[in-house]
């Protein structure tokens, strides 16, 4: 007898991880008791100074208590947690896709002045080059899921041609624009009006909000990578992927 696979509600992932990874304001509207403690923790994090403090993903992170939490079990748990956070941050990506993409990205040979790029930088560069991520970073959508819907329904053009693959990997000087029809532009303008424009679009995206165009101008320079308002432990993510 075959059992139907049970669907896991999307928002419960935030509850399990105890973090508002995508800055979803809808989480504050949930009234059930199980969300009350989650709301209390979020309110502490919503302090202006904490919420808008930017985190450089390439800074050296040293544990305050280096002698604690070094057991194999705790390391595995922390690595697993960080991998789930990373996948949810980029729209709920599955483990199989993360493993294939991360292993592929860290094996590629990228050089700057004959020096090998840091694997964390290469990994972030790969995921920040995804079409759905770029559309969301430019505030053309309120979430990566919404950006995926725009792409799948043909509302997004790359170099003048419609692209319906949300994982499409952009190259330097690619031009992303919204289709020239009333429905497509109305959807994007509505999202822009509702957006709080934080975090601001990263430096490698030149955004024209009048023409609804994005120019992807990424260069092999560490200073052009985006910064986030929370820290992603990429070392733990990659460690979990390699061992899993």
Image (cartoon, rainbow, N blue to C red):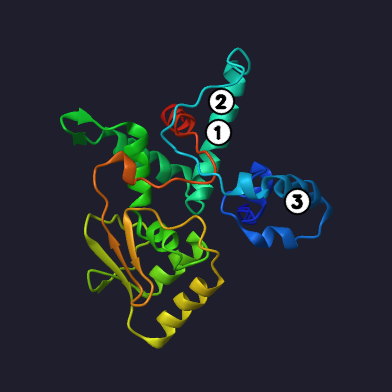
Residue linked to disc 3: 39
Q: Which residue is mark 1?
A: 80
- For the residues labelled 3 and 1, the Cα–Cα distance comes to 24 Å
* The image quarter in which residue 64 lies: top right
3 and 2 marks in contact (CB < 8 Å): no
Q: Secondary structure at mark 3?
A: helix
Residue farthest along the bottom direction in this orientation: 182
At 41% across and 34% down in the image, what residue appears?
58
Q: With respect to residue 152, does 110 lie above or below? A: above
N-term-proximal mark, 3 vs 1 = 3
Q: Secondary structure at mark 1?
A: helix
Q: Residue at x 61, y 22 (%)?
A: 74
The numbered dot on residue 76 is 2
Within 10 angstroms of label 3, few (less than 14), some, or many (20 or more) residues? some
- Residue extending farthest to the top is 67
In this image, 118 relative to 227: left or right? left
Q: Is residue 114 left or right of residue 5?
A: left
Residue 152 sits in quarter: bottom left
Front tag of 3 and 1: 3
Query: In the visual, does 21 lie left or right of 217?
Result: right
Residue depicted at x 64% and y 50%: 48
Tell me which residue sits at (49%, 72%) in the image: 192
Q: Secondary structure at mark 2?
A: helix
For marks 3 and 2, give the CA distance: 27 Å
On screen, residue 4 above or below 238? below
């Amino acid at each position: 007898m075959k059992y139907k696979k049970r669907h896991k509600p999307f928002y419960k992932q935030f509850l399990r991880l105890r973090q508002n990874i995508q800055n979803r304001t809808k989480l504050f509207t949930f009234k059930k008791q199980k969300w009350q403690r989650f709301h209390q923790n979020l309110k502490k994090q919503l302090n202006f100074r904490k919420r808008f403090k930017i985190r450089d993903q390439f800074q050296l992170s040293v544990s305050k208590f280096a002698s604690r939490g070094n057991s194999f079990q705790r390391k595995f748990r922390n690595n697993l947690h960080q991998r789930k956070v990373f996948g949810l941050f980029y729209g709920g990506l599955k483990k199989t896709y993360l493993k294939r993409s991360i292993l592929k990205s860290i094996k590629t040979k990228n050089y700057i002045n004959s020096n090998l790029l840091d694997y964390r930088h290469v990994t972030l560069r790969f995921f920040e080059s995804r079409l759905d991520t770029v559309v969301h970073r430019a505030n053309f959508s309120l979430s990566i899921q919404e950006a995926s819907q725009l792409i799948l329904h043909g509302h997004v053009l790359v170099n003048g041609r419609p692209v319906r693959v949300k994982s499409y990997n952009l190259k330097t000087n690619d031009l992303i624009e919204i289709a020239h029809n009333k429905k497509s532009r109305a959807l994007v303008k509505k999202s822009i009006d509702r957006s709080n424009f934080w975090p601001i679009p990263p430096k490698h995206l030149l955004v024209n909000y009048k023409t609804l165009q994005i120019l992807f101008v990424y260069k092999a320079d560490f200073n052009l990578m985006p910064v986030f308002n929370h820290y992603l432990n990429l070392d733990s993510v990659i460690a979990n992927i390699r061992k899993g």
